[in-house]
Amino acid sequence: MPKLMYALECPECSAEVAVDPEARVSEIVECPDCRIELEIASMDPPSLTPAPEVEQDWGE
């Protein structure tokens, strides 16, 4: 029996992004169309936001 997935909309390109219902808030997923990294903002209801940019640590 296939595993059920949430079908969420990419906030950048509106493509369908499959998210495992067992995923956790703050997990990162990638849009299959535009390849942007998305962060799971909520699981109730499921929603995605663009992932924050990773800032470089220059050892300061």
Image (cartoon, rainbow, N blue to C red):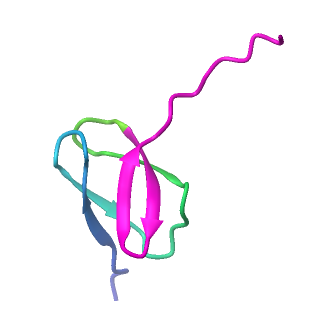
User: Where does the image place residue 42, in percent across and percent down from the top left?
Assistant: 45, 65
23 in relation to 38, above or below: below
* Residue 43 is a magenta residue: yes
User: Where does the image place residue 53, in percent across and percent down from the top left?
Assistant: 51, 28
22 in relation to 7, above or below: below
Residue pushed farthest left?
A: 14
33 in relation to 1, above or below: above
Query: Which quadrant of the figure contains the N terminus?
Result: bottom left
Residue pushed farthest bottom?
A: 1
Q: Nearer the viewer, residue 18 or 52?
A: 52
Q: Is residue 12 left or right of residue 29?
A: left
User: Where does the image place residue 36, in percent across and percent down from the top left?
Assistant: 35, 36
For the image, the number of numbered tags is 0
Task: Identify the residue shown where x is 25% and y is 49%.
Answer: 10
Q: Which image quadrant is residue 34 in? A: top left
* Residue 52 is a magenta residue: yes
User: Where does the image place residue 24, in percent across and percent down from the top left?
Assistant: 55, 66
Please provide the residue range marked out in magenta: 37-60
Query: Which quadrant of the figure contains the C terminus?
Result: top right
Q: Is residue 33 left or right of residue 44?
A: left
Task: Identify the residue shown where x is 26% and y is 62%.
Answer: 8
Residue pushed farthest right?
A: 60
Q: Which image quadrant is residue 44 in? A: bottom left
Task: Identify the residue shown where x is 33% and y is 80%.
Answer: 4
